Every structure is written in structure tokens, then in C-alpha cells.
Amino acid sequence: MASSDIELLIQHLSKLPGLGPRSARRAVLHLLKKREGVMLPLIRSMQAVADNIKSCSICGNADTHDPCHLCSDPRRDASLICVVEEVADLWALDRAHAFAGKYHVLGGVLSAIDGITPDDLNIHGLEKRVEAGGIKEIVLALSATVDGQTTAHVLRDRLSSYDVTISSLAHGVPVGGELDYLDDGTLLQAMRERRPVS
């Protein structure tokens, strides 16, 4: 059996998404084997992140600066805001170079089951940004789940009094997707979102 320190490390790692006890055990064994080249640099990187990462006071992104590098970038279109649930969604869209505007992280979605209300999300911060002026379009990039769509509906209601276009991501058949492998909800949404062929 491993020492209590190693077992504790395995327990901590197994709490990470995608890692169960077996995967965590393999990761710890790899770290122990590659102590100088992997484990010690990882420890230093984790400490640096723990010491230096802040939440952007404008959009909610995680960065070493406040405002973050995206909010500070003059090349981004400040008249467009893409609303996402979590920082991971922001990073995914930015990594794909799918959006050239600014972002806004809600910090989750509304959920009656989990007791998450509009007051628990960063909706007020979004309203303040729109009130400040200069925003032409809000893109709602939220999950195609019941909670995501409920959140989108609440945001549309809250922002309806402002002179701003509100749009949402298209949902439906993914590129390269075969109809036979898609779930009923995706097929239904794709049929509803159909458009003329040009």
C-alpha cells in the first residue's frame, strides 16, 4: 500500500473532472516516476496560478490581470458581447477564434433543482454593461439544455428594454454528423432551425 501522503494525493486528484481513483493512481505513479521533469514544474505552475489568477471584474474571465487580456484588447469589437455559462466556454470559443467581440461569464445557469436563481448569476453585471451604452448585439452562447434555455429566456426578458439585438447560437446537426447517430432532441432542433439553401 502507498503511504498516507500518496493516498491523499490520489484522493485529491480523483476529484478532478475525468479522473477517477484508478486514473488518479496512474497519474500519481507517473508524477513520482518523472519527479524532476513533471511533478516539480507542475507544483510550481499550480502555485503560480493559485497566487496570481484573478476573476476579471468586467467579464468574469480567469486571468492574471484585471481587466483580463480579452477585455483590454483594443482589437476586439466592444459593441458585441457573447454571454457564456462558464470560463471554460469562453476559452473554447476564443480558442476556436469563433468570436471577435467581448465576453461575459454568467457563472452557471438557472436551476430550480439546484436552487440557482438570477441573483446567483452575474446577470446584473451584464445589465450594467448594456446600460453603459455602445453595445449593439448580445450573443447568448448557452447550453441547449432546459436550464440553459430557461436562462436565455430570462436574459432576453431582462434585456428587452434596451436597444440591443439579442441572438443565440444555432443548434442542430453538427458538421460531419450522421443523422442515424443523433439524439431525438438534436434532430428536432435541427428541423426547427432549418433555413433555405442558397
Image (spheres, rainbow, N blue to C red):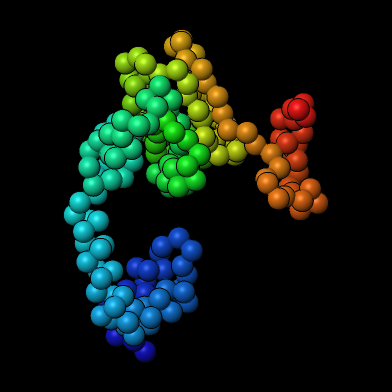
Q: How many marks?
A: 0
Classify residue 44 as left or right of residue 192.
Answer: left
Classify residue 114 as left or right of residue 145.
Answer: left
Which residue sits at x=40%, y=64%?
A: 15
Q: 87 or 68, which lies in front?
A: 68
The quadrant holding residue 66 is top left
Classify residue 24 as left or right of residue 51.
Answer: right
Q: 70 or 154, which lies in front?
A: 70
Q: Position of residue 106 (x, y in %)?
A: 40, 34
Residue placed furthest toward the bottom: 1
The quadrant holding residue 103 is top left
Quadrant (top left/top right/bottom left/bottom right) for the C terminus = top right
Q: Position of residue 144 (x, y in %)?
A: 60, 38
Residue placed furthest toward the left: 51
Residue placed furthest toward the right: 180
Q: Position of residue 111 (x, y in %)?
A: 50, 37
Q: Position of residue 121 (x, y in %)?
A: 39, 33
Which residue sits at x=81%, y=51%?
A: 180
In this view of the protein, can residue 165 be seen by the observer? yes
Give the answer, above or below, for where 186 lies relative to 132.
below
Quadrant (top left/top right/bottom left/bottom right) for the N terminus = bottom left
Give the answer, above or below, for where 22 lies relative to 78.
below
Which residue sits at x=28%, y=69%?
A: 42
In this view of the protein, can residue 7 be seen by the observer? no
Which residue sits at x=21%, y=59%?
A: 48
Classify residue 82 as left or right of residue 34.
Answer: right
